[in-house]
Image (spheres, rainbow, N blue to C red):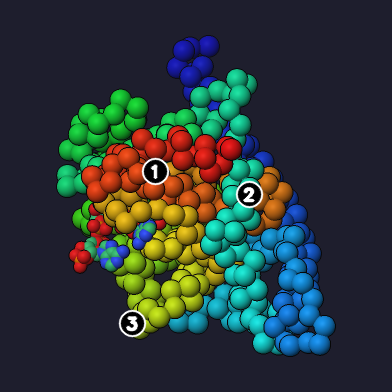
Amino acid sequence: MSLEKLMEKFLEQSMEAEDNFYRLEEQRLQVEDKRREEEHSRELQMLQMLGQIFASIRTPSPAPTATPQPSFIPQTNLTVPLARPSLGNRNHPPALIDFASHSQAAGPGLLMEEVIERSFSLGTSGMDNVIPLVRNTIPPLTSKKHKGQDGRIGIIGGCQEYTGAPFFAAISALKVGADLSHVFCTKDAAPVIKSYSPELIVHPVLDSPNAVEEIEKWLPRLHSVVVGPGLGREDMLLKNAKEIVERSKLRGIPVIIDADGLWLVAKEPSVIQGYQRGILTPNFMEFTRLYEAMHHEPLDSSDHKRSAQQLSIALGHLTLVLKGEEDIITDGKNILTCSQEGSGRRCGGQGDLLSGSLGAFAHWAFSSPSDATKGMNPSLVAAFGATSLTRQCNRQAFHKHGRSTTTSDMIQEINSAFKKLFES
Ligand SMILES: NC(=O)C1=CN([C@@H]2O[C@H](COP(=O)(O)OP(=O)(O)OC[C@H]3O[C@@H](n4cnc5c(N)ncnc54)[C@H](OP(=O)(O)O)[C@@H]3O)[C@@H](O)[C@H]2O)[C@@H](O)CC1
Ligand SMILES: Nc1ncnc2c1ncn2[C@@H]1O[C@H](COP(=O)(O)OP(=O)(O)OP(=O)(O)O)[C@@H](O)[C@H]1O
């Protein structure tokens, strides 16, 4: 047989093997979905019981009982499809109706969402609830693994103006423990980003005519993608980023959207709406833009938690991380707040550390068995890991550098902050 024929045969066989892999992976996810759904209905029952207990505490009673410690984590919908169609009606998404009816289940005088929030609200004491779940998802460092197994993360961003942001995100993913970090940026940003670090794999393709095909070649090897740090707002770059999100969804890859990626979502929410492996990480400005795009009315900023929850619901229960004095993390059903002590220093790039590290945490959370997160939505666990880590880095860096603290100083703290939070 000629060499050409042999090559052809080899290619055919490897494509077949890849197809088989995805078929099996899809079957595995379906079985996993079913198991989670069963688990979910059990938990829902327990949640209702918990609601009744809280309700009875709220109603004055002659013989007060002790506040029960939640011994489980309520969670309502854990299905993780490989790809989901977007929800059509922006003003009255079905999920909103679904949530409203669930909200009554906790008994008189107490909304379900309040029950959930009480269980998870993480001031200082509540931290203890979620940190162990984050820990459970962190892969152990053993000699049995090969390069790549702990995470291959892709960053979509980096253009002429912004080279720092994709660098911060990519290096943070590596420093947290991912094995490989790829940056897909424009041609002129690439040499700059490469010059910051030999650690990163930099692809100068984002503004090339066949950008999507070039990047898609790498998707089967990536465990998560972070879209937006330093992406800029040029139409062509946003269009390519959009297509990459679509193709990542088809493969079930966790997609974290930050910075200019959120500009894209505000313009075209359907790009990520309803995708259960999608996580958005807006600052307040980005949040306002998203909220107003979805709800067609000004944001009432008196209750951030409620607004975050509403936005998540409108986006099909996507996980949102609203960054601020306290970080609000919600999938529309559960709300976590992370108020890990940081500092008063707000230098640019901290959000990139957060989204890059979240790339690694999200991969770990989604590839962990569901008992690792005790049935809690893996996106919430991952987001909590990344926000607490970012804030701890900020605190430690500030301790050393005071007002001179920059994001590079925070990145230097990742190892010890990680140890303190998750390994001690
Ligand atoms: N070294 C690098 O390369 C870095 C590059 N980066 C990259 O820059 C790109 C653009 O990102 P961006 O966030 O600067 O843009 P945009 O959404 O227009 O916001 C700008 C305006 O929003 C406001 N504002 C912000 N936060 C707010 C808050 N919490 N609460 C309220 N208001 C708030 C604030 O308004 P002002 O204070 O001026 O009134 C500000 O002027 C993006 O690609 C990103 O990744 C960064 O990652 C940093 C490091
Ligand atoms: N007032 C605050 N107090 C404490 N921590 C905060 C405060 N505001 C933001 N943070 C923390 O800083 C991190 C980054 O949030 P920030 O709002 O600076 O993001 P960003 O504007 O998207 O960042 P970037 O400069 O990378 O674009 C988050 O982990 C958040 O918890």
Tags 2 and 3 touching, CB below 8 Å: no
Residue shown at 38% from the left, 63% from the top? 324
Q: Is residue 170 left or right of residue 150?
A: left
Q: Which disc, if any, is residue 133?
A: 2
* Mark 1 Cα-neighbour bin, 10 Å: few <14, some 14–19, many ≥20: many
Quarter of the picture holding the C terminus: top right
* Mark 3 Cα-neighbour bin, 10 Å: few <14, some 14–19, many ≥20: few
Residue 364 in picture, x, y percent from top left: 56, 42
Disc nearer the start of the sequence (2/3): 2
- Residue occupied by mark 1: 396
Question: For the residue with label 2, is its CB less than 8 Å from the closest atom of ligand 2?
Answer: no
Residue 161 visible in image: yes
Residue shown at 55% from the left, 78% from the top? 96
In this rendering, is residue 242 above or below 91? above
Residue 34 visible in image: no
* Secondary structure found at label 3: loop
Question: For the residue with label 3, is its CB less than 8 Å from the closest atom of ligand 1?
Answer: no
Which amino acid type is shown beneath numbered disc 2?
Leu
Q: Quadrant of ligand 2?
A: bottom left
* Mark 2 Cα-neighbour bin, 10 Å: few <14, some 14–19, many ≥20: many
- Spatial CA distance of label 1 from label 2 is 23 Å
Disc nearer the start of the sequence (1/3): 3
Count of marks overlaid on the render: 3
- Spatial CA distance of label 1 from label 3 is 37 Å
* Secondary structure found at label 2: helix
Residue 421 in picture, x, y percent from top left: 53, 43
In this rendering, is residue 359 above or below 344? above
